[in-house]
């Protein structure tokens, strides 16, 4: 995969197996974390501030995160963080296969057809990493084809009451093409986010570890490169991620455009509302961009590291057969 392998010798099967496996493992380990992040981003209630005690703030957070299970036991609260697992599985596995498995093909195309142009524009020293980043950006924009599955996942995560008792196919019939709401905002989020993810990883492998063949990276090198890529990606895409989530969380009857949501957020909630996950940790006296990375970063670092490690591993296994 680009940073994943960047090597055309890895077969399509290896790329799909490696990326698909990373999606499955990410889903099993991080779906509750993703649910918490989505619920915080969709929340419009003031969590803390003047006149609100710490106890009240924690109570608000309990209601926002656990919703109907807020007053139930610990195990029930934990189970409440697994809504729409079927839709989430379909989306996450296909997304990782498309993104982590598809990006190397775009990178191969750029390398085989436009390498000289990149060398001219960026110099030979930087053209390889820029190609990896550009391939990531292109594949990120194309990710909007999976938007309906992503929208279903978010609806189940943040609007359980509105969709209680409804199956996936019933919601699809009711919502129709409105499941593609926010496509332009998703593309605007994914383009820089994926550029930063794959580019940041490539920079670390190229200049820190001085690898000419990214598929030769060790698990440790993949892990460090994934941290760099994930932190960079989260940093540049955080505000647009909040807007995208709010667009997708609404029903077709209550739909609002992205710019309307932006205006409402600025007027009613302030600029800090674009960093909702960050503000969660402000209550705990942890400030800055670090909180967003602590919530969202681990699952991206995990899946990216696993994909980068498994794709060449599967490639070698298949070559031996």
Image (spheres, rainbow, N blue to C red):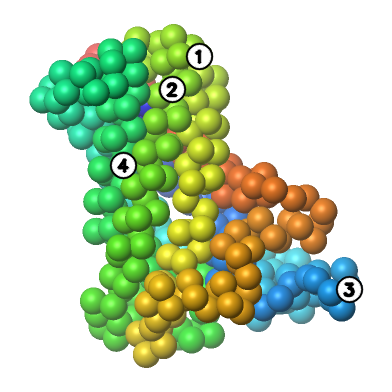
Q: N-terminal of the two: label 2 or label 1?
A: 2
Q: Which mark is residue 53?
A: 3
Above or below, 152 against 161 in this view is above
User: Residue at label 2?
Assistant: 203
Q: Left of 254 or right of it: where is 231?
A: right
Give x and y (percent) for residue 132. Answer: 31, 29
Residue 14 in view (yes/no): no
Counting residues from the start of the chain, the first of labels 2 and 3 encountered is 3
- Residue holding disc 1: 208
Q: In the image, is 45 to the left or to the right of 146?
A: right
Which of the two labelled residues, at mark 3 and mark 4, occupies the earlier sequence position?
3
Report the Cα–Cα distance between label 4 and label 2: 15 Å
For residue 137, the mark is 4
Q: Are marks 2 and 1 in contact (CB under 8 Å)?
A: yes
CB of mark 4 within 8 Å of CB of mark 2? no
The residue located at (40%, 24%) in the rendering is 202
């Amino acid at each position: 995969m680009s940073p994943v392998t960047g090597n055309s010798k890895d077969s399509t099967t290896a790329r799909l197996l490696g990326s698909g496996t990373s999606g499955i493992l990410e889903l099993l380990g991080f779906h509750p974390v993703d649910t918490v992040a989505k619920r915080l981003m969709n929340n419009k209630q003031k969590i803390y501030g003047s006149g609100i005690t710490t106890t009240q703030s924690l109570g608000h957070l309990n209601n926002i995160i656990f919703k109907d299970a807020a007053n139930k036991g610990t195990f029930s609260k934990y189970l409440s963080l697994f809504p729409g697992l079927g839709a989430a599985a379909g989306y996450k596995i296909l997304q990782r296969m498309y993104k982590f498995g598809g990006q190397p093909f775009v990178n191969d195309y750029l390398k085989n057809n436009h390498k000289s142009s990149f060398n001219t524009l960026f110099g030979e020293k930087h053209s390889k990493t820029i190609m990896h980043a550009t391939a990531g950006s292109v594949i990120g924009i194309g990710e909007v084809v999976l938007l309906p599955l992503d929208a279903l996942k978010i609806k189940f995560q943040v609007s359980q009451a509105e969709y209680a008792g409804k199956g996936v196919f019933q919601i699809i019939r009711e919502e129709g093409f409105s499941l593609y709401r926010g496509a332009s905002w998703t593309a605007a989020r994914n383009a820089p986010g994926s550029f930063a993810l794959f580019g940041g990883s490539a920079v670390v492998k190229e200049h820190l570890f001085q690898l000419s063949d990214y598929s030769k990276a060790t698990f440790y090198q993949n892990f460090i490169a994934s941290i760099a890529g994930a932190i960079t990606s989260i940093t540049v895409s955080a505000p647009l991620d909040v807007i995208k989530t709010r667009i997708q969380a609404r029903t077709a009857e209550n739909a609002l455009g992205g710019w309307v949501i932006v205006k409402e957020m600025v007027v009613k909630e302030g600029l800090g509302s674009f960093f909702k996950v960050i503000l969660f940790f402000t209550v705990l006296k942890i400030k800055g961009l670090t909180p967003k990375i602590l919530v969202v970063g681990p699952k991206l670092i995990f899946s990216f590291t696993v994909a980068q490690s498994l794709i060449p591993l599967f490639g070698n296994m298949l070559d031996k057969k």
